[in-house]
Amino acid sequence: MMLITLPVYMPIVQRLDIDLIWFGVLYLICMQLGLLLPPHGLLLMTMKGVAPPQVTMALFRAVVPNIAMSIVLLLIITAFPAIATWLPNILG
């Protein structure tokens, strides 16, 4: 997915002078959400496939807190970009 979409987005992001680290963090969170949420939910289907037979569709309800926290994290990092960039800035 990244090999297909990043060559399209990166020239736009660079032209708009958006911090590449901040964009990368947001991009990865959005990609993780896209792989968990329906209609495709590739990660959910993979988890269901490797789970023991006694695990029912409750697996889908079990990821709701993860999805909710990912959305909250996405909103926080969007509002405060320094959260995503402080460690790279310290390291150099």
Image (tube, rainbow, N blue to C red):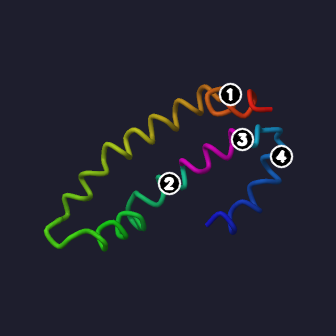
Closer mark to the observer between disc 2 and disc 4: 2
Query: Residue at 26% across / 58% down in the picture?
Result: 60
Mark number, residue 21: 3
The single residue placed furthest to the left in the displayed view is: 54
Mark positioned earlier in the residue sequence (2 or 4): 4
Q: Residues within 10 Å of mark 4 (few under 14, many from 20)?
A: few
Closer mark to the observer between disc 4 and disc 1: 1
Q: Quadrant of residue 41?
A: bottom left
Q: Residues within 10 Å of mark 3 (few under 14, many from 20)?
A: few
Q: CA distance from mark 2 to mark 4?
A: 23 Å
Query: Residue at 77% across / 62% down in the picture?
Result: 7
Closer mark to the observer between disc 1 and disc 2: 1
Magenta segment, which residues?
Answer: 21-29
Residue 9 image position (x, y, % from top left):
74, 55
Residue type at the position of mark 1 = Trp
For mark 4, what is the residue?
14
Query: Residue at 38% across / 46% down in the picture?
Result: 67
Q: Residues within 10 Å of mark 1 (few under 14, many from 20)?
A: few
Mark number, residue 86: 1
Q: Locate residue 47 relative to residue 87 in the image: left or right.
A: left
Is label 2 in contact with label 4 (beta carbons under 8 Å)?
Answer: no
Mark number, residue 77: none
